[in-house]
Amino acid sequence: MPTPTSSLNAFVATATKAARLAAREITRAAQDRDQLEITDKARNDFVTSADKAAEAAIMRELMEAYPQHGILTEEAGRLGPKSDFLWIIDPIDGTTNFIHGLPQYAVSIALTYCGEPIAAVVYDVAKNELFTAAKGQGAKLDSRRIRVSENDEMRRSLIGTGFPFRPGADIDGYLKGFKNVAERSAGIRRPGSAALDLCWVACGRYDGFWEFSLKPWDVAAGGLIVLEAGGLITDLTGGEEWLETGNVCAGNPKIFAQLLPLVGKLPVNTQTEAAQNEKVQIKNDKVRRTLSTKKA
Protein backbone atom coordinates (compact mmCIF):
# COMPACT_ATOMS: atom_id res chain seq x y z
CA MET A 1 0.00 0.00 0.00
CA PRO A 2 1.75 3.19 -1.15
CA THR A 3 2.01 6.36 0.92
CA PRO A 4 -0.80 8.74 -0.13
CA THR A 5 1.46 11.52 -1.42
CA SER A 6 -1.33 13.27 -3.30
CA SER A 7 -2.90 14.39 -0.02
CA LEU A 8 0.25 15.44 1.84
CA ASN A 9 -0.08 19.17 1.18
CA ALA A 10 -3.67 19.10 2.38
CA PHE A 11 -2.65 17.24 5.54
CA VAL A 12 0.03 19.83 6.32
CA ALA A 13 -2.35 22.71 5.61
CA THR A 14 -4.99 21.29 7.93
CA ALA A 15 -2.46 20.64 10.68
CA THR A 16 -1.11 24.17 10.29
CA LYS A 17 -4.59 25.64 10.69
CA ALA A 18 -5.18 23.46 13.75
CA ALA A 19 -1.85 24.51 15.29
CA ARG A 20 -2.64 28.20 14.82
CA LEU A 21 -6.06 27.76 16.41
CA ALA A 22 -4.39 26.04 19.36
CA ALA A 23 -1.86 28.86 19.59
CA ARG A 24 -4.69 31.37 20.05
CA GLU A 25 -5.86 29.45 23.10
CA ILE A 26 -2.33 29.21 24.46
CA THR A 27 -1.60 32.90 23.93
CA ARG A 28 -4.88 33.88 25.60
CA ALA A 29 -4.00 31.75 28.62
CA ALA A 30 -0.44 33.12 28.76
CA GLN A 31 -1.81 36.65 29.02
CA ASP A 32 -3.83 35.71 32.10
CA ARG A 33 -1.50 33.23 33.76
CA ASP A 34 -2.94 33.81 37.25
CA GLN A 35 -6.17 32.15 36.12
CA LEU A 36 -4.39 29.08 34.78
CA GLU A 37 -5.71 25.80 36.20
CA ILE A 38 -2.90 23.30 36.82
CA THR A 39 -3.31 19.60 37.58
CA ASP A 40 -0.61 17.08 38.50
CA LYS A 41 -0.83 13.99 36.24
CA ALA A 42 2.24 12.41 37.82
CA ARG A 43 5.47 13.53 39.41
CA ASN A 44 6.96 16.31 37.24
CA ASP A 45 4.11 15.89 34.73
CA PHE A 46 1.43 18.57 34.55
CA VAL A 47 -1.62 19.49 32.52
CA THR A 48 -3.16 22.95 32.41
CA SER A 49 -6.45 24.40 31.29
CA ALA A 50 -4.49 25.81 28.33
CA ASP A 51 -3.39 22.30 27.29
CA LYS A 52 -7.01 21.16 27.33
CA ALA A 53 -8.32 24.18 25.41
CA ALA A 54 -5.56 23.90 22.80
CA GLU A 55 -6.11 20.17 22.41
CA ALA A 56 -9.85 20.67 21.95
CA ALA A 57 -9.22 23.27 19.23
CA ILE A 58 -6.90 20.89 17.37
CA MET A 59 -9.25 17.95 17.65
CA ARG A 60 -12.23 19.93 16.36
CA GLU A 61 -10.31 20.96 13.26
CA LEU A 62 -8.88 17.52 12.52
CA MET A 63 -12.09 15.61 13.19
CA GLU A 64 -14.06 17.94 10.95
CA ALA A 65 -11.55 17.62 8.12
CA TYR A 66 -10.79 13.90 8.51
CA PRO A 67 -13.51 12.13 10.52
CA GLN A 68 -12.26 8.77 9.24
CA HIS A 69 -8.82 9.21 10.87
CA GLY A 70 -7.76 8.13 14.35
CA ILE A 71 -6.28 10.51 16.93
CA LEU A 72 -3.74 10.02 19.72
CA THR A 73 -3.30 12.96 22.09
CA GLU A 74 -1.28 13.52 25.22
CA GLU A 75 -4.29 14.43 27.34
CA ALA A 76 -7.23 12.47 25.88
CA GLY A 77 -5.45 9.32 24.68
CA ARG A 78 -6.60 7.29 21.66
CA LEU A 79 -9.81 8.50 19.99
CA GLY A 80 -11.76 8.06 16.78
CA PRO A 81 -12.09 5.07 14.45
CA LYS A 82 -9.44 2.42 13.88
CA SER A 83 -7.59 3.66 10.82
CA ASP A 84 -4.26 3.44 9.02
CA PHE A 85 -4.14 7.22 9.51
CA LEU A 86 -3.36 8.41 13.04
CA TRP A 87 -2.91 12.02 14.14
CA ILE A 88 -0.47 12.32 17.06
CA ILE A 89 -0.92 15.54 19.02
CA ASP A 90 0.84 17.38 21.82
CA PRO A 91 -1.09 20.62 22.42
CA ILE A 92 1.73 22.13 24.47
CA ASP A 93 5.09 20.41 24.29
CA GLY A 94 6.89 22.09 27.17
CA THR A 95 4.01 22.54 29.61
CA THR A 96 6.32 23.10 32.59
CA ASN A 97 8.01 25.95 30.71
CA PHE A 98 4.60 27.41 29.89
CA ILE A 99 3.50 27.26 33.53
CA HIS A 100 6.59 29.20 34.60
CA GLY A 101 6.38 31.78 31.83
CA LEU A 102 9.45 30.46 30.04
CA PRO A 103 8.82 31.05 26.31
CA GLN A 104 9.98 27.65 25.10
CA TYR A 105 6.99 25.51 24.17
CA ALA A 106 5.25 24.42 21.00
CA VAL A 107 2.21 22.84 19.43
CA SER A 108 3.18 19.51 17.86
CA ILE A 109 0.98 17.70 15.32
CA ALA A 110 1.97 14.70 13.19
CA LEU A 111 0.06 12.38 10.91
CA THR A 112 1.23 8.79 10.67
CA TYR A 113 0.22 6.33 7.98
CA CYS A 114 0.51 2.70 9.11
CA GLY A 115 2.84 3.85 11.87
CA GLU A 116 5.12 6.03 9.73
CA PRO A 117 5.06 9.85 10.03
CA ILE A 118 4.07 11.44 6.72
CA ALA A 119 3.09 15.00 7.66
CA ALA A 120 4.27 17.23 10.49
CA VAL A 121 3.75 20.66 12.00
CA VAL A 122 5.54 22.15 15.00
CA TYR A 123 4.52 25.69 15.89
CA ASP A 124 6.70 27.71 18.26
CA VAL A 125 4.00 29.91 19.75
CA ALA A 126 6.22 32.43 21.53
CA LYS A 127 8.56 32.99 18.56
CA ASN A 128 5.85 32.62 15.88
CA GLU A 129 7.96 30.09 13.98
CA LEU A 130 6.22 27.38 11.98
CA PHE A 131 8.14 24.19 11.13
CA THR A 132 6.51 21.84 8.62
CA ALA A 133 7.37 18.72 6.67
CA ALA A 134 5.74 16.26 4.30
CA LYS A 135 7.25 12.88 3.51
CA GLY A 136 9.47 13.11 0.44
CA GLN A 137 8.91 16.86 0.06
CA GLY A 138 11.46 18.38 2.42
CA ALA A 139 11.10 20.54 5.53
CA LYS A 140 10.41 24.23 5.98
CA LEU A 141 10.64 26.99 8.55
CA ASP A 142 7.76 29.26 7.61
CA SER A 143 8.13 29.35 3.80
CA ARG A 144 11.88 28.72 3.68
CA ARG A 145 13.41 25.29 3.03
CA ILE A 146 15.69 24.16 5.84
CA ARG A 147 18.61 21.76 6.06
CA VAL A 148 20.63 20.31 8.90
CA SER A 149 24.03 21.82 9.64
CA GLU A 150 27.17 20.82 7.76
CA ASN A 151 29.43 20.78 10.82
CA ASP A 152 31.39 17.53 11.03
CA GLU A 153 33.43 18.12 14.20
CA MET A 154 32.00 17.04 17.54
CA ARG A 155 34.28 19.47 19.36
CA ARG A 156 32.55 22.34 17.54
CA SER A 157 29.03 20.96 17.87
CA LEU A 158 26.11 22.24 19.91
CA ILE A 159 23.96 19.37 21.16
CA GLY A 160 20.44 19.44 22.57
CA THR A 161 19.06 17.05 25.16
CA GLY A 162 16.32 16.56 27.71
CA PHE A 163 16.71 15.31 31.27
CA PRO A 164 14.72 12.17 32.14
CA PHE A 165 12.03 13.15 34.62
CA ARG A 166 9.47 10.37 34.75
CA PRO A 167 9.34 7.85 37.62
CA GLY A 168 11.70 4.95 37.03
CA ALA A 169 14.14 6.94 34.91
CA ASP A 170 17.80 5.97 35.33
CA ILE A 171 19.33 9.36 36.06
CA ASP A 172 22.78 7.86 36.72
CA GLY A 173 22.80 6.13 33.35
CA TYR A 174 21.71 9.29 31.60
CA LEU A 175 24.43 11.32 33.30
CA LYS A 176 27.11 8.94 31.97
CA GLY A 177 26.03 9.81 28.44
CA PHE A 178 25.80 13.48 29.37
CA LYS A 179 29.40 13.38 30.60
CA ASN A 180 30.54 11.70 27.37
CA VAL A 181 28.96 14.42 25.25
CA ALA A 182 29.97 17.31 27.51
CA GLU A 183 33.63 16.29 27.33
CA ARG A 184 33.64 16.16 23.53
CA SER A 185 31.26 18.90 22.32
CA ALA A 186 31.18 22.69 22.33
CA GLY A 187 28.14 22.64 24.58
CA ILE A 188 24.86 21.03 25.61
CA ARG A 189 21.50 22.77 25.85
CA ARG A 190 18.31 21.64 27.57
CA PRO A 191 15.45 24.07 26.78
CA GLY A 192 12.61 21.68 27.67
CA SER A 193 10.66 20.94 24.47
CA ALA A 194 11.73 17.86 22.51
CA ALA A 195 9.62 18.89 19.52
CA LEU A 196 11.50 22.18 19.23
CA ASP A 197 14.84 20.51 19.95
CA LEU A 198 14.33 18.30 16.91
CA CYS A 199 13.26 21.26 14.78
CA TRP A 200 16.41 23.07 15.82
CA VAL A 201 18.43 20.10 14.60
CA ALA A 202 16.51 20.29 11.33
CA CYS A 203 17.30 23.97 10.74
CA GLY A 204 20.93 23.75 11.88
CA ARG A 205 20.71 25.52 15.24
CA TYR A 206 21.74 22.27 16.88
CA ASP A 207 24.08 19.72 15.36
CA GLY A 208 22.55 16.83 17.30
CA PHE A 209 20.06 15.81 19.97
CA TRP A 210 19.41 12.84 22.24
CA GLU A 211 16.90 11.92 24.89
CA PHE A 212 15.18 8.79 26.14
CA SER A 213 11.79 7.70 27.47
CA LEU A 214 9.87 10.22 25.39
CA LYS A 215 6.29 9.70 24.22
CA PRO A 216 5.06 9.49 20.61
CA TRP A 217 3.56 12.98 20.75
CA ASP A 218 6.94 14.39 21.84
CA VAL A 219 8.83 13.19 18.76
CA ALA A 220 6.51 12.18 15.90
CA ALA A 221 6.38 15.60 14.22
CA GLY A 222 9.92 16.71 15.02
CA GLY A 223 11.37 13.39 13.88
CA LEU A 224 9.88 13.69 10.40
CA ILE A 225 11.06 17.29 10.15
CA VAL A 226 14.63 16.16 10.92
CA LEU A 227 14.49 13.43 8.28
CA GLU A 228 13.07 15.73 5.62
CA ALA A 229 15.79 18.29 6.40
CA GLY A 230 18.49 15.74 5.57
CA GLY A 231 19.18 14.57 9.11
CA LEU A 232 19.14 11.16 10.75
CA ILE A 233 17.09 9.93 13.67
CA THR A 234 17.17 6.49 15.29
CA ASP A 235 16.57 4.85 18.62
CA LEU A 236 19.56 4.51 20.94
CA THR A 237 20.58 1.19 19.38
CA GLY A 238 20.76 2.76 15.93
CA GLY A 239 17.50 1.06 14.94
CA GLU A 240 14.32 2.48 13.43
CA GLU A 241 12.07 2.19 16.48
CA TRP A 242 12.57 5.72 17.78
CA LEU A 243 8.84 6.44 17.67
CA GLU A 244 7.90 3.22 19.47
CA THR A 245 10.59 3.34 22.16
CA GLY A 246 10.82 7.09 22.70
CA ASN A 247 14.60 6.72 22.83
CA VAL A 248 16.01 9.17 20.33
CA CYS A 249 19.32 10.18 18.80
CA ALA A 250 19.25 12.69 15.95
CA GLY A 251 21.62 14.95 14.09
CA ASN A 252 23.22 15.88 10.85
CA PRO A 253 24.69 12.66 9.39
CA LYS A 254 28.30 13.32 10.42
CA ILE A 255 27.58 14.43 13.99
CA PHE A 256 24.96 11.73 14.41
CA ALA A 257 27.60 9.09 13.68
CA GLN A 258 29.77 10.51 16.46
CA LEU A 259 26.95 11.17 18.93
CA LEU A 260 25.23 7.78 18.89
CA PRO A 261 28.18 5.80 20.34
CA LEU A 262 28.41 8.31 23.19
CA VAL A 263 24.79 7.92 24.29
CA GLY A 264 23.66 4.69 22.65
CA LYS A 265 24.16 2.38 25.60
CA LEU A 266 21.95 4.33 27.98
CA PRO A 267 19.49 2.12 29.87
CA VAL A 268 15.80 2.60 29.26
CA ASN A 269 13.55 3.42 32.20
CA THR A 270 10.61 1.25 33.11
CA GLN A 271 7.43 2.14 31.24
CA THR A 272 3.87 2.29 32.47
CA GLU A 273 1.34 -0.12 31.01
CA ALA A 274 -0.38 2.75 29.19
CA ALA A 275 2.89 3.84 27.60
CA GLN A 276 3.63 0.29 26.49
CA ASN A 277 0.18 0.03 24.90
CA GLU A 278 0.76 3.24 22.94
CA LYS A 279 4.04 1.88 21.60
CA VAL A 280 2.57 -1.52 20.74
CA GLN A 281 -0.22 0.17 18.76
CA ILE A 282 2.28 2.20 16.72
CA LYS A 283 4.45 -0.87 16.13
CA ASN A 284 1.41 -2.86 14.97
CA ASP A 285 0.58 -0.08 12.52
CA LYS A 286 4.07 -0.41 11.04
CA VAL A 287 3.71 -4.18 10.75
CA ARG A 288 0.42 -3.77 8.87
CA ARG A 289 2.07 -1.35 6.48
CA THR A 290 4.92 -3.80 5.79
CA LEU A 291 2.52 -6.67 5.13
CA SER A 292 0.36 -4.53 2.84
CA THR A 293 3.44 -3.49 0.86
CA LYS A 294 4.51 -7.11 0.42
CA LYS A 295 1.05 -8.11 -0.81
CA ALA A 296 1.04 -5.25 -3.31
Image: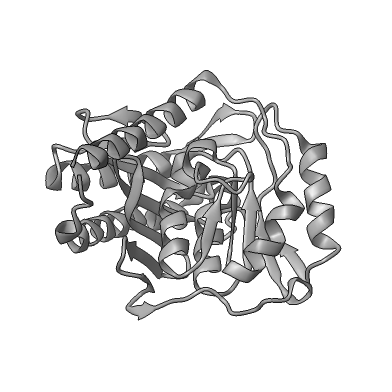
Q: How many marks?
A: 0
Residue 118: quarter of image: bottom left
**Residue that sits furthest to the top in the current view:** 273
As drawn, 164 above or below 261: above
Please name the residue shown 57% across and 77% down the image: 149
Residue 31 visible (yes or no): no
Residue 296 visible (yes or no): yes
- Image location (x, y in percent) of residue 71: 28, 36
Residue sitting nearer the eye, 115 or 119? 115
As drawn, 280 above or below 91: above
Q: Quadrant of the N terminus?
A: top left
Q: Quadrant of the C terminus?
A: top left
Q: Is residue 109 left or right of residue 227?
A: left
Q: Is residue 82 left or right of residue 33?
A: left
Please name the residue shown 78% across and 38% down the image: 171
- Image location (x, y in percent) of residue 109: 35, 51
Q: Is residue 38 left or right of residue 154?
A: left
